Each structure stands twice: as C-alpha cells, then as structure tokens.
Amino acid sequence: MLKLQKNPNIDDPIENLYIHVPFCHKKCGYCDYYSIVSQTADYESFLEAIKKEWKITKNYLEKNHNPLRPLKTLYFGGGTPSVLSPQILTQLINYFESEIGFASDIEITMEVNPEPIGQETVLAGIKTGVNRISLGFQAKQDHLLKKIGRLHSYQDFLRMLDLIREQGIKNISCDLMFGLPDQNIEEALISAQTLIDLQIPHISFYSLILEENTLFYKKYAKHPELLPSEDSEREMYRQLLNIFESNQYQYYELSSVAKDNYFSRHNYNYWSTKPYLGLGPGAHSYFNGIRKGNIRSIKDWALDPWKSAEIEEIDFDLAMREYAMLAFRLNEGFSVEKFEKRFLIKNPFEKELKNLIEQGLIVKDQQFEQYYLNPKGLDFANLVFMEFL
C-alpha cells in the first residue's frame, strides 16, 4: 500500500545546485571523491560540458513539470574548485545566474585549499558572488598534514584565511580530521582550539575513513594498528564535541557545529531530503523522486552526461526510511509531527523507534513526540541508521 504513495521530493521546488570540479594539484591519500590532476585539465571543455549537462537536465525538468526556482544555494565542490582559472569560475557563476536566477539571499559556497596557487581564483569568485568559503584545514600540525598528503602548511592556511577575511567574507567553514595516522587526542584538541581561537563560525569534524581504491586503504586496511583504535576515535569525537559546545558552538549535525546560525544551508538541504541538482563527473542529484549518480570519468561524462549516469527511483517507502535515517543525523532528531506533515501519513516507524530505545541508542521527548540520539547513539550512529534501511 505504501508503494502507491508519492515521494514528496517530486513536488518540492528545486532551489539548490552542486557543481563538482574534478581537478586537484595532487590527490590526497584518503580521498575517494572523483578527481584528476589539474596539470592535464581542459577547463574550457569542462565549462562547455557543464553547460551541456545543464541543458539536458533543464529539458528533463520541463518535460516532467518539476518546479525550478531561483537558487537558494550554489556549491562548488571537488576536487579543488580554486584550481579553476578565475575566468572559468566567473563564467560558471554568471551562467547559472542567467539560466536559473539567484535568490536575493543566495548562499554561494566554494571549497578552497590553502595553497598559494588559486588565490586569484578565490578573489574572482568572491567578486562574482561567492559569500561562503569552505577552507581546508584538517589539522594544525604540519607533520600530520604531510602524512595525509596535503600540500599546504598551517602558515599557508593562515595566509589564505587572512586573504578571505580581507575581502569581507565572514561565513567560513573549516574541516577538521581526527583518527589520523600518528595523531593523538591532544593534537586533535589543539587543532580544534586553534579554530575556536581563530573564530571560525562553522566547523566540520570527521574521522578518517578508509575508502576502497584509495592509497590509504591499500596502506592501512591490513595494518589497523597504525591508526588510532575505534575506542580512541570515539574518545576523540566526544572530547571534540565537548570543547566545541563549551565554547558556544551549536552541534546541529553529527559532524558539524556552528555559531550564530552559520550552519550550511546547502548541506542542511541534503539532510532534509529536499531536491538538489548535481552537475559534473561524479556528482549526485536527487530530484523528481530519482537519485542520479554521474559516472566517475570526465571523458565519458562529457560525451553524454545522462546516458552514462546511474538512475535510482526512490519510492515512497524508501523516501520515508531515508528521511527518518537522516533526521537522526541532525540535532533536532526525528519529529513525528514533521514526518506526518511531510508524508501525510501516521508515523510507521513505532517498532523501529521502540527497538532503538530498548537498545539505549535514542531517547524520546514525550511532550513533543520527538526522538534524539543519546551519547551512546552518537558513538554508534550507524546502528541507528541501519534500523531504517
């Protein structure tokens, strides 16, 4: 019976766009995102292929009567978007402002590596409308940065941060990694305190994950003793979350904290199962009730961005399960009221929620009929997610 219902994602307005820039000066050993070395990049051809994919996508949206509105978020991820030439980045921003339009309060995010090469592109992006920067940090200690294959030093990070702030950008996010080879808890906490002292308003902190087909997987998968233990990782996470919250950062997502409402509007859209478009090789989209994954080959993607993509239909049952799962990523948790408002049916997950309470992974707010991860649930969040899949 549930299969006959309609995924609400189909009728939601599309207001969010992600562009995957698949170029890097050097690929980090832990990175599983699709990228190629920038020395061989043809940026003009990349620009034309993005436009080609957009035109095919636009025709699809019109054919299916999917509501497209001026963008509320535009996100340049990678790869390393700052390796693009200033002209190409400027043309991309102007093109989509002309094609789709921008909301008056649009959030335009650009991922930036703190390397001297790319400063002109960063300045061009800010001049053309970029108002949020996600700046690579990872760790304060240069020996750890070198260990994971980063090309920048801590001093490089500070120089790029100064450059960005000189342009008037306040909305800055930094990534902090823990569970790195040879990293101890004190080093992770020193890195966290550094970002706090620098008054970075948004911080994403996540542990190293050994993804297959990465250099780190080949190096460490058979030698886990070279990495911090799972217990040590969990302790790092707890202490990092504690130091952020004690410094007035609001934990709003499993691996994200923010001050003064500087949360990522683009990422929040993902976690809310609202539509988003993704353009570029390796990019993902979710709209019209389908999930589209572009092929991880710039050559094949450029030839036919849609024909080479994987398409998965997200039916009503799976849409509900993904909504519940992702709700537990957020500090606000799973709200029965919000669920019923979105899906127009009574909450079907009473059994799953009861099981999770009995396992001691979540707690219930009786007054508002809302469910949250407790400290044990934070440690074993994957067990909570698996309950719905």
Image (spheres, helix red, strand yellow):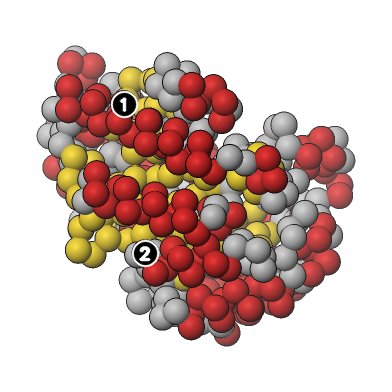
Looking at the picture, does residue 386 appear above or below residue 220?
above
Write the residue at 70% across / 32% down.
212
In the image, 174: left or right of 338?
right
Residue 57 vs residue 357, the one in the foreground: 57
Query: Could you say where residue 347 lies in the image, as x and y percent from the top left?
Result: 22, 35
Residue 257: x percent and y percent? 46, 66
Q: What amino acid is labelled 1 in the image?
A: Ile
Q: Secondary structure at mark 1?
A: helix
> Is residue 133 something that shows in the picture?
yes
| Residue under numbered circle 1 | 56
Query: x and y percent of residue 60 in the render?
Result: 25, 24
Does the rendering let one see residue 334? no
Residue 206 in the image, given as x and y percentages of width and height: 59, 56
Q: Is residue 224 left or right of residue 163?
A: right
Residue at (18% x, 40% y) in the render = 68
Q: Which residue is mark 2?
A: 128
Q: Quadrant of the N terminus?
A: top left
- Crowding at dot 1, Cα within 10 Å, few <14 / some 14-19 / many 20+, comes out as few
What element does badge 2 sit on? Answer: helix
Q: CA distance from mark 2 to mark 1?
A: 26 Å
Q: Judge whether 43 appears above or below 322 on screen.
A: below
- Taking depth in this image into account, of 103 and 54 the one nearest to the observer is 54
**Could you tell me the amino acid type at mark 2?**
Thr
Examine the image and state in which quarter residue 40 appears: top right
* Residue 223 falls left or right of residue 127: right
Q: Earlier in the sequence, mark 2 or mark 1?
A: 1
**Mark identifier at residue 95:** none
Q: Nearer the viewer, residue 61 or 127?
A: 127
Residue at image x 43%, y 25%?
305
